Image (spheres, rainbow, N blue to C red):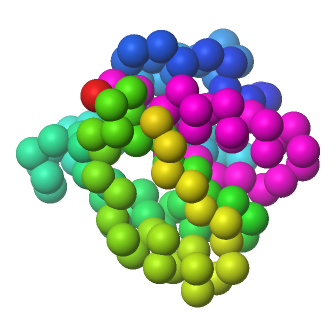
């Protein structure tokens, strides 16, 4: 499976033949964000769970990108930036369409990139 994100639209992310609402890619693992678990913990999907933070740092990434949504509503915990700084990992939080472009660009350059994309708000 290609890890390139083929398309993002409101509420939809297409990777190859698969479609996701929100996605987390870590190494070769592509997974739908666990909406029920996020709502159980936070009451919303506009937060990043501890389990997702852990996954973002798996597989020794060179870069971590967070797509914060179309209006940057997703809240990014400061611990991500702090841990990235400590480990020498480049980190960016961008509106989701820009995050997808940046992710694909870095992937094409051969970088090891982990990404979390929120596809709404």
Q: Taking 35 as reference, is 70 above or below it? A: above
Q: Residue furthest right?
A: 109
Write the residue at 90% across / 45% down. 109
Query: Residue 38: image x %, image y %?
Result: 23, 47
Q: Is residue 4 left or right of residue 92?
A: right
Q: Nearer the viewer, residue 116 or 100?
A: 100
Query: Residue 79: image x %, image y %?
Result: 39, 75
Q: Taking 17 as reference, is 68 above or below it? A: below
Q: Nearer the viewer, residue 112 or 31?
A: 112
Q: Residue furthest bottom?
A: 86
The answer to whether any part of residue 28 appears in the image is yes
Quadrant including the N terminus: top right
The answer to whether any part of residue 59 appears in the image is no
Write the residue at 58% across / 68% down. 57
Query: Residue 27: image x %, image y %?
Result: 70, 53
Residue 34 falls within the magenta-colored stretch: no
Write the residue at 57% across / 55% down. 92
Q: Taking 19 as reference, is 39 above or below it? A: below
Residue 103 falls within the magenta-colored stretch: yes
Q: Is residue 74 left or right of residue 20?
A: left
Q: Nearer the viewer, residue 89 or 20?
A: 89
Q: Is residue 76 left or right of residue 62?
A: left
Write the residue at 52% across / 61% down. 55
- What stretch of residues is rendered in magenta? 96-120
What is the number of callouts on the image?
A: 0
């Amino acid at each position: 499976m290609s890890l390139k994100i083929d398309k993002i639209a409101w509420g939809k992310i297409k990777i190859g033949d698969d479609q996701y609402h929100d996605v987390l890619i870590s190494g070769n693992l592509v997974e739908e964000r666990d909406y029920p678990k996020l709502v159980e913990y936070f009451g919303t999907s506009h937060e990043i769970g501890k389990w997702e933070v852990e996954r973002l740092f798996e597989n020794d990434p060179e870069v971590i990108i967070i797509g914060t949504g179309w209006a940057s509503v997703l809240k990014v915990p400061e611990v991500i930036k702090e841990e990235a700084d400590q480990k020498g990992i480049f980190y960016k939080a961008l509106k989701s369409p820009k995050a997808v472009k940046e992710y694909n660009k870095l992937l094409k350059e051969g970088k090891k990139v982990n990404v979390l994309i929120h596809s709404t708000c």
